Image (cartoon, grey):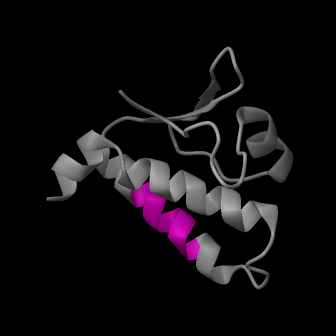
């Protein structure tokens, strides 16, 4: 199981609570909340995480208004996945 935490203090201020409020799609393996409300994305493996990031990129491209908090939150989730050391090793 691979767990990727979206770092606190991102440009969107994304937390578990705001993730739920925005109704963003969850990965197949789900999400968790840390005790401080940080968002943790759960994946079976790196391939599932990369596929989810690609799905988020497609969703991001489909949004008409690029200034919404949801757009910023989606991009913060993509960056958290892409910056994960296991994902970087997997994709190189």
Which residue sits furthest right? 21
Q: Is residue 58 above or below residue 38?
A: below
Residue pictured at 47% horizontal, 56% vertical:
79
Main secondary-structure element of the magenta-colored stretch: helix
Residue pictured at 14% horizontal, 59% vertical:
92
Residue pictured at 55% horizontal, 64% vertical:
56
Left or right of 70 on screen, residue 42: left
Which residue sits furthest left? 92
Residue pictured at 55% horizontal, 52% vertical:
77
Q: Is residue 3 above or below residue 64?
A: above
Image quadrant in which you'd find residue 68 = bottom right
Q: Is residue 17 above or below residue 37?
A: below
Query: Which residue is more in the foreground, 6 or 51?
Result: 6
Magenta segment boundaries in residue numbering: 51-58
Left or right of 41 on screen, residue 22: right
Query: In the rendering, at what x and y percent does residue 58 appear?
Result: 55, 75
């Amino acid at each position: 199981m691979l767990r990727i935490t979206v770092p606190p203090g991102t440009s969107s201020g994304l937390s578990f609570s705001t993730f739920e409020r925005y109704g963003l799609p969850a990965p197949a393996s789900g999400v968790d909340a840390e005790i401080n409300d940080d968002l943790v994305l759960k994946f079976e493996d790196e391939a599932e995480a990369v596929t989810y990031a690609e799905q988020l990129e497609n969703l991001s491209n489909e949004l008409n208004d690029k200034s919404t908090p949801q757009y910023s939150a989606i991009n913060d989730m993509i960056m958290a996945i892409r910056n994960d050391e296991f994902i970087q090793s997997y994709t190189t």
